[in-house]
Image: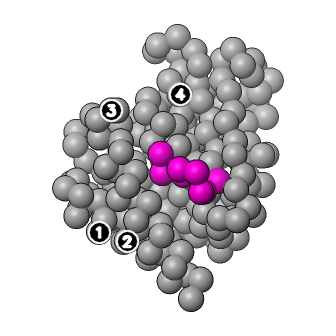
Amino acid sequence: MLGHMIDKYRSFAQLARAEASGTDYRISSVERPESPVVVVAPHGGGIEVGTSELAALIAGDDHSLFAFEGLKPYGRNRDLHITSHRFDHPECVALVQRSAVALGVHGCIGESQIYVGGLDGELAALMAHQLSLAGFRVSAEGHRYPGLNPLNICNRGRLGRGAQIEVTRDLRDVAARPAIAMAVRVAIADYVEAFER
């Protein structure tokens, strides 16, 4: 989330009427029905740089993945940002609604910090714990990115609650991504194990 700038588009349908798929943006979607988990990067590509790559690392070969990626020249992708509680790409919403566990991956301003949020306090706490163990500075409450709107894409799964991470630009770099993804994957595995018991 890039501060509190006003979005140009209030829905995906509005964006799709004005922007060209394949030129201005692209969709990457992989459904793995054997996993209860979907990882979503609604502001990937050039919108919040590094978030689609991070989401793909978290999903790995076992979880479902949806990324909306801005393809415009540098500095022009902000137009493609649809805030999370209005992010209503039909394929994404359907995929999330079929999944028990949804995780949103976002970029935010600041330095060397990860903010954990979402209505699923248990998953958020597990992620905060694993990310802290991995040596990252994590904030789990009282921050600007709580992710508590029920319409937030991460909260639209089968259980009506999910989690999100907001990652500062420096930690979305190639060097930091694998460690973040590994910590989040461990948290998801612990959560799913408890959930399926």
Q: Position of residue 145 (x, y in %)?
A: 40, 53
Q: Residue furthest bottom?
A: 197
Which amino acid is tagged 3?
A: Asp
Of callouts 2 and 4, the N-terminal one: 4
**C-alpha distance separating marks 4 and 1:** 28 Å
Indicate whether 54 appears above or below 116: above
Inter-mark Cα distance, 2 to 4: 27 Å
Instruction: Residue 126: give its label.
Output: 2
Instruction: Give the residue type that dot 4 points to.
Output: Gly
Please tell me which of labels 4 and 1 falls first in the chain.
Answer: 4
Residue 84 image position (x, y, % from top left): 57, 47
Stretch in magenta = 57-64
Classed neighbour count for the residue bearing mark 1: other residues with Cα under 10 Å, few (<14), some (14–19), many (≥20): some
At label 3, counting other C-alpha atoms closer than 10 Å, the crowd grade (few under 14, some 14-19, many 20 or more) is: some
User: At 59% across and 30% down in the image, what residue appears?
Assistant: 69
Residue 4 appears anywhere in the view: no
**Residue labelled with disc 3:** 173
* Mark positioned earlier in the residue sequence (2 or 3): 2
For the residues labelled 3 and 1, the Cα–Cα distance comes to: 21 Å
Which of 197/44 is in front? Answer: 197
